[in-house]
Image (cartoon, rainbow, N blue to C red):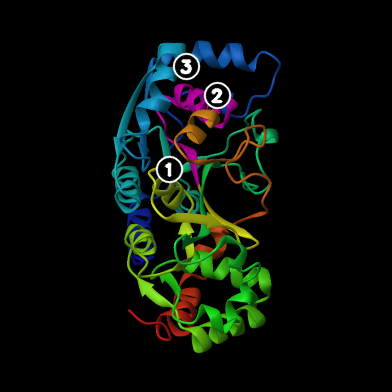
Amino acid sequence: MILLKMTMRLIIVFAALAGTLPALAQDASLLSYSGPDRDRKLIAAAQKEGTFTIYTTIADKDMPTLVVPFEKKYGIKVKVWRASTDKVLQRTVSETAAKHYEVDAIHIGSPELEALHREKILQPVNSPYFKELIPGAVPAHREWAATLLSVWVQAYNTNLIKKEELPKTYQDLLDPKWKGKLGIESKIQEWYSTVVLDIGEENGIKLFQNIVARNGISVRQGHSLLNNMVIAGEVPMAIAMYNYMPEAAKRKGAPIDWFVLDPAVARANGMGIARRATHPNAALLFYDYMLSTEAQKLLVGMDYVPTNSRVPSPLGNLRIKLVDPVLTLDQLDKWTRSYEEVVLKGGKK
């Protein structure tokens, strides 16, 4: 969240330097085309371009699983630059300000994509795959689309807590039996705000105040650390944890499992195409590919949660509530203060 704040300030500075973007250097008309021959035209245009560049936060170890089948299928070279979210944002914005248009596609978190939309760095897309995606995966302006979800679940130590003892609702965490057993990560304001608003802001804040007051919440920095502490039994239950972490540890035999308190909250990562892309058609072909069942199944195989509703989710039919990227941008300070006051100050480290 601190990085997001810093990056938002940098975007404002760089955007002021950039001024009005000139007209597109390449024909990007297929981005909005929906005719019956769209696929044929797009493949031909993309193969003529031959390559494109993507800036992404997807792990280095996972990119070849996605890229290699695409390159073999279409004969198009994918140039990947991978970095943290703040570095991807900063490079994208600073290059735009300098009129150095190297990037064609950007794959990062939805709040950051929304920030790029506001600075007119992305362009709208009309993909036939939109109709297959889960609700909320494509904003009204169509300048990015969600490709995968990072879902927060609840994790517990199976040696210390029996499955039949697990809470069914957040209200159940008020039970005295959870005193001294709960843990949480220190920077998950997005999860907190989404749960609170789903309950109702006033009642949601009051609920978390009461949970902290009655049973306490151990605050830890980093999801990996919290996951390891659940495994070790130092924190018997984490009330918010990325789903793939306990699942991976469970497969290796660790005494950990996960469950979901309704709703399962998810942060979307997605992809947008740069307004000044020099290879817009090759980028668009990869954009379609990432939303297709072909790539979505590959993502599931790497423990990601898909956004294409035709691909079975590892979470089954659980209700998923997406973090609102607009709210994240516009009310970041408000929910950071609330999380600090309600959870962090009352919790213990």
Judge the density around disc 2: few (<14), some (14-19), many (≥20) Cα neighbours within 10 Å. some
Numbered disc total: 3
Locate the N terminus by quadrant. bottom left
Question: Whole-Å distance between the Cαs marked 2 and 1?
Answer: 25 Å
Q: Are marks 2 and 1 in contact (CB under 8 Å)?
A: no
Query: Which stretch did the figure color magenta?
Result: 269-295
Marks 2 and 3: which is nearer the front? Answer: 2
Amino acid type, label 1: Arg
Closest to the camera, between mark 2 and mark 1, is: 1
In this view, 87 is above or below 147: below
User: Going 55% across and 17% down the picture, which residue do you hit?
Assistant: 42
Q: Which mark is residue 251?
A: 1
Q: Which residue is mark 2?
A: 294
Residue 14, x across and y down, in percent: 33, 54
Outermost residue, bottom side: 213
Q: Are marks 2 and 3 in contact (CB under 8 Å)?
A: no
Disc number at residue 46? 3
Q: Position of residue 245 (x, y in %)?
A: 41, 51
Tell me the distance, in whole angstroms, between the alpha carbons under discs 2 and 3.
Answer: 19 Å
